[in-house]
Image (spheres, rainbow, N blue to C red):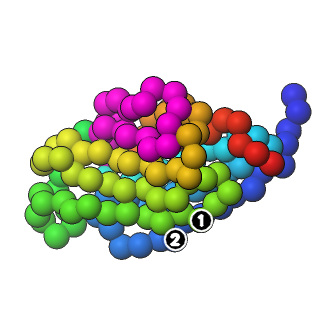
């Protein structure tokens, strides 16, 4: 098995109720974007299926109670500065349970979405990046 060097990039951390952090590991022409959450969630679906400039991920919050005791969540975003083409990750609550995670890229990107077994992360595997 050939091991390639990886580069880890951390996004700016901000005070949020749902979004926790973003960690990006890059090796050669691929990358893994791991979005970490403060609240448990269930992955429902994503679109477009395999490639796009904006990745839309639909999730279900397991608990919609915030640390302040309210169930009202607001839009959150994390700006990302990386060589993967990812610019920003946005959390948009749709109702008290369902929400959307949006990933904005510079160009059409090929990807796979992998829900984390811990219910507190999603990994997006990016393919075909330039070196």
Sequence order check, earlier mark of 1 and 2? 2
- Residue 64 at x, y = what percent? 18, 51
Residue at (61%, 53%) from the top-left corner?
Answer: 85
Residue at (12%, 48%) from the top-left corner?
Answer: 96
Q: Nearer the viewer, residue 77 or 96?
A: 77
Quadrant of the snapshot with the N terminus: top right
- Residue 14 at x, y = what percent? 41, 73
Using the numbered discs, state the Cα–Cα distance from disc 1 to disc 2 in whole angstroms. 9 Å
Q: Which residue is mark 1?
A: 81
Say whether residue 56 is magenta: yes
Residue 72 seen by the camera:
yes
Question: Predominant secondary structure in magenta?
Answer: strand
Q: Relative to 126, does residue 71 appear above or below in the rendering?
A: below
- Residue 100 at x, y = what percent? 29, 45
Label 1 close to label 2 by CB (< 8 Å): yes
Between tags 1 and 2, which lies in front? 1
Q: Which residue is mark 2?
A: 12
Residue at (46%, 51%) from the top-left corner?
Answer: 104
């Amino acid at each position: 098995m050939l091991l390639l060097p990886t580069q880890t990039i951390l996004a700016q951390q901000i005070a949020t109720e749902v979004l926790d952090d973003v960690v990006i590991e890059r090796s050669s022409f691929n990358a893994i974007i791991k979005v970490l959450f403060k609240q448990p969630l269930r992955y429902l679906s994503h679109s477009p299926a395999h490639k796009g400039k904006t990745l839309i991920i639909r999730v279900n919050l397991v608990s919609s109670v915030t640390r302040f005791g309210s169930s009202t969540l607001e839009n959150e975003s994390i700006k990302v500065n990386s060589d993967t083409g990812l610019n920003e990750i946005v959390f948009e609550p749709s109702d008290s349970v369902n929400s959307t995670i949006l990933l904005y890229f510079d160009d059409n990107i090929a990807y796979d979405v992998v829900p984390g077994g811990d219910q507190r992360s999603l990994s997006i595997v990016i393919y075909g990046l330039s070196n």
